[in-house]
Image: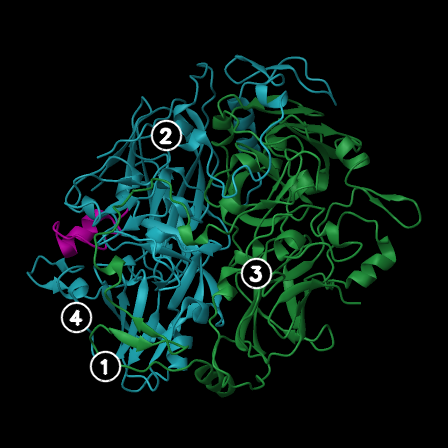
Chain colours: A green, B cyan
Amino acid sequence: MTTEKKSIRFGRLRRAPENFVTQDLADQVYQHGMDETRRGFLRKSFVTALGAATAGGAVSQALAADGEKVILDKLPWQMTLGQPVAARPYGMPSQWEANLQRRESPGLTRVSAASVAFAPLQGFFGIITPNGLHFERHHQGWYDIDPAQHRLMINGMVKQEMVFTMDDLMRLPSVSRIHFIECGANTGLEWGNVAVPSVQYTHGMLSCCEFTGVLLSTLLDMSGADLKKGKYILAEGGDGSGMTRTIPMDAALKDVMVCWAMNGEMLRPENGYPLRLVVPGVQGVSWVKWLRRIEVGDMPYATKDEAVHYIDLLPNGLHRQYTTIQECKSVITTPSGGQQLLDKGFYNVSGMAWSGRGKIRRVDVSFDGGNNWRTARLETPILSKAITRFNIDWNWDGAPAILMSRAIDDTGYVQPMIKQLREVRGTRSIYHNNAIQAWKVDPNGEVSNVQVG
Amino acid sequence: MTTEKKSIRFGRLRRAPENFVTQDLADQVYQHGMDETRRGFLRKSFVTALGAATAGGAVSQALAADGEKVILDKLPWQMTLGQPVAARPYGMPSQWEANLQRRESPGLTRVSAASVAFAPLQGFFGIITPNGLHFERHHQGWYDIDPAQHRLMINGMVKQEMVFTMDDLMRLPSVSRIHFIECGANTGLEWGNVAVPSVQYTHGMLSCCEFTGVLLSTLLDMSGADLKKGKYILAEGGDGSGMTRTIPMDAALKDVMVCWAMNGEMLRPENGYPLRLVVPGVQGVSWVKWLRRIEVGDMPYATKDEAVHYIDLLPNGLHRQYTTIQECKSVITTPSGGQQLLDKGFYNVSGMAWSGRGKIRRVDVSFDGGNNWRTARLETPILSKAITRFNIDWNWDGAPAILMSRAIDDTGYVQPMIKQLREVRGTRSIYHNNAIQAWKVDPNGEVSNVQVG
């Protein structure tokens, strides 16, 4: 697979002097205030700046943490006129972030148009996924569809069949909701053994956006859907693969959305522009892209992509079908596989947690392969069926360590170990691997994917 | 100024048959459910689809709302293999959205490097601002700074002066918070009279992101800031203009952040990559970009950009200084100036509300120039010092109308009319115009900027 360079974040740490203080941190403080122990430790961890700092004036010299002299003025960008406004009417990231890309895993599928581009979670922050790095999963490639030609039909067991243009839809009462989308096959490579080296490839079929659109219930209401007899929705996409999936009516009426926007702007072509289904908490394949038709029916549709694909072979020889909900899951995104810590000392360990059943209640983190656990801080707002960001302090003393995160959602469900999942589903499963992820830190600071238990 | 084409959203509405039903809508329903009146109205508003819709099969023909035959299959994108995954390692918007850009108002300033690029709010959804369309305001242009060379110094009334690299900072305990940023001069052109034709130029110095960084209080704590004597912070930027601003210590300790990320990825160069100050609720100039120094002192610094600029001349001849908080404000973003409605009938009227003092409590909307008001729906989560999205149903009967929104925040403060503001501050003010915005709809559907009262 395409190997990316080591994370430039942790890779830029210059080698520190040997006299870094190691000290056990007090138990996790839940608020963001600092207790004396942590304050003292952090203060010692950074070599102080010496030099001619004068109050009120610009500092021309200082010593940085590693003793290197740093000139704080007379840098090129302080002495020239910079770029004008609107130099880029639609802006792009810094050139220094060019290494952060979504990436295919070549050879994963035979055709790159029916493949995956994994999101680089190791470089993300907070809960919002940058639109340009949203993961991709296509069955017959992607298109940039002309929105003027796109239509959405509602038919089947309805009083009034209807056809909508994009203008028709975008006049309707809309809602905006933050939700994660995860492919059912996310982490699927890890069923049998450790397969891939970095969090981009273990967990990168995951993204989270503020989606805007009209509630499917509004459209069903407008068309007079038969709610007595109609028990299922068929959603059909307008791409070459004509993706079709069944949605149960109760889910359809509850929080399913027909969306045109992600994180404040129209959908990206790779994510179904101009229209896609949003099915909160449910695996990504049901979030039909380039959505063109909704049909109301009275039986599950047993389409190709739910009868033959997207099923799991169990050890008893039976197939597990229609498993739609993405169960509670979490992963540490930094430090994570493929990165390298060049320093002992204090780190903010960070990651994501999510549940298709509702909100995250708690995330615990272990640094010793699951023997001891500490509770992480959760960023707010904590939202239902959306990513929650967690952070926790860690003082690395240079010894080998195994980092793991374990999420609990508000149903009380606890994210399982891979061993527990295999006992039920064997090692030949493909979908719905929500097991705890472990990262090993070697004394030289290298972080790698490892399985525990 | 650069005039953009009429909004393609509303501009694409085909002329509808004359038999559209007009009907008064019932009073606003707060939940997203539909009452019978609205259901009946919406159903009649859209001409139904006729044609050979068969349950379970693809629909090859249907009639769209205007009687035009629509072919739902045999479109080019259904018959070919699309683009592969990771065709664009960092994706961009659809080609069909190319008209949505941030734009300068040429002539607003003498030099485009010290100017504004306005965000196209009319094309936004929800509360998150797409990073590529975040507004710009620079004083000596923008740069793409090498993060390896960037430093942050903490000095002044501290026990330990410190210099941080980006790696040093990004190891610290971080937080992620959603906040709006608004330039103090936003809507400033409208003080005297109606100046500009669209919401991009009346309100486009506004954006909202999930910011990630370390709390300033953490850095002050690490450096042992003297909290008895130290009452003010000076923040200094590393760009050519060397922007400096005073922050009172109580604000600094409360929620000010030193940030490196916006909406899940590193800051954009135009927004201060790799480091900026985030001062929730406070005018944008204090959110120092390319942040390089924090100094603790015991008096306000009276820097150029707070003593001479960013002040308001009052009718009594005195200057109003250090007005930092952005007061409660709202605006309807669609329909808005420069757009055109081609149709009578149902519309979802949508806009944004925000307050530098906390959460939005309520938004009311008028359709008759302020005589009658109805309460809008607010999208959740409703966050402190962040944008809140509001939506409200409207049935346009084709008569002239004047649309206005009025926000109330959780302090009880009510967004004022422009007349009320002028009574206090005259017409020569520049900053802090948070008045109610009015849009006039003519019988031909054209929407224009108008002042009421």
Quick check: B232 above or below A244? below
Q: Quadrant of residue B196?
A: top left
Quick check: B195 above or below B330? above
Counting from the top left corner in percent of width and height, residue A49 is at 34, 80
- The mark that comes first in sequence, 4 or 2, is 2
Say yes or no: labels 4 and 1 on the same chain.
Answer: yes
C-alpha gap between disc 1 and disc 2:
51 Å
Q: Secondary structure at mark 1?
A: loop
Observer-nearest of B450 and B51: B51
Would you say B99 lies left or right of A197 here?
left
Q: Which residue position is annotated with label 3? A: A382
Q: Which residue position is annotated with label 2? A: B7
C-alpha gap between disc 4 and disc 1:
12 Å
Q: Secondary structure at mark 4?
A: loop
Say yes or no: labels 4 and 2 on the same chain.
Answer: yes
**Range of the magenta residues?**
B417-436
Observer-nearest of B430 and B259: B259
Q: Is residue B426 magenta?
A: yes
Give me the chain letter of mark 3: A
Give me the chain letter of mark 4: B
Callout 2: 10 Å neighbours few (<14), some, many (20+)?
many
Q: Which residue position is annotated with label 1? A: B298
Q: Amino acid at mark 2?
A: Ser
**Mark seen at residue B302:** 4
From the viewer's perspective, is the residue at label 4 or at label 3 nearer? Answer: 4
Q: Amino acid at mark 1?
A: Asp
C-alpha gap between disc 4 and disc 2:
44 Å
